[in-house]
Image: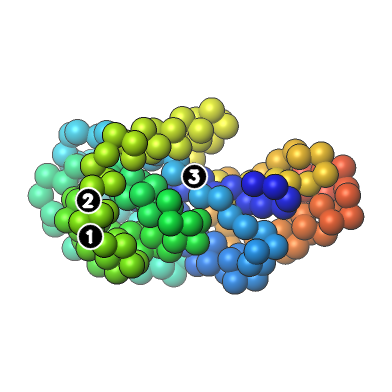
Amino acid sequence: MQGPHLVYFADPMCSWCWGFSPVIEQIEQRFGDALPIRLVLGGLRPWTTQPMDAGDRADVRGHWEHVHEASGQPFDYGFFERPRFVYDTEPASRAVVVLRRRGMPTALAALRRIQRAFYAENRDVTQVDTLAALAAELGMDAGAFRDEYASQAAVDETRADFALAQGSGVRGFPTLIAGGGQDERYALITHGFQSAARILPALEQWLGDAASAADGAGGEACALQ
């Protein structure tokens, strides 16, 4: 992307990304085309094959409770009654990649819809039937979605996103960085969940610095850890 923009590293089955979802939506509403968002699928637990055991369930439930407390986002804890669930995040990520081909706003909408289906509606987003139904809600023909989802090109594009996240040194989600200032350096906005009350002023500051051709020091100063 040219000009000021954000790169958002996220995973549709990352609970802290679900907590951060309203913040991303507020960024879209506040800045619009002045600060477009590029979504990169990070790959939280891709290609997992082992079902969750009791320890896994306890660990995940603890994360969900913390996210709900911090963000107010809803969770359906009926998920933990599902037997032998395999927490593979690649299918949901690949679904977002397919929908991203319709434009980045569609990708962000797909991320939100899949997150809500998984966390608040207890739907199995590791299954293509569920993902095709959600794609249809977003305006894509379910049959066309299935065809694209099953293609090697979609698999490769999803792998490329995961590789980009790893190559960028991103090890946790959500991670949001800003780029496109005069010197093309990137500034870390947040690595992990932060509220809109902290993120929006940081972005306002960074945009102001970029507009005044600052050398990047302002972007570093507003970075949130």
Mark 3, Cα crowd under 10 Å, few <14 / some 14-19 / many 20+, is many
Q: Which residue is mark 2?
A: 146
Q: Residue at x 43, y 51 (%)?
A: 101
Q: Secondary structure at mark 3?
A: strand
Question: Label 2 is placed on what type of residue?
Answer: Arg
Which residue is depicted at the point 53% across and 54% down? 193
Within 10 Å of disc 2 (Cα), the crowding (few <14, some 14-19, many 20+) is some
Residue 162 on image: x %, y %: 43, 35
Q: Is label 2 in a helix, a strand or a loop?
A: helix
Q: Is residue 77 left or right of residue 40?
A: left
Q: CA distance from mark 3 to mark 1?
A: 23 Å
| Count of residue discs | 3
| Residue 200, position as x, y percentages in the image | 67, 64
Q: Nearer the viewer, mark 2 or mark 3?
A: 2
**Is disc 1 placed on a helix, strand or loop?**
helix
Q: Amino acid at mark 1?
A: Ala
Q: Is residue 208 visible?
A: yes
Give the residue at mark 1: 142
Asked if disc 2 and disc 1 are in contact, CB closer than 8 Å, the reply is yes
* Distance in Å between CA atoms under marks 2 and 3: 21 Å
Q: Which residue is mark 3?
A: 40
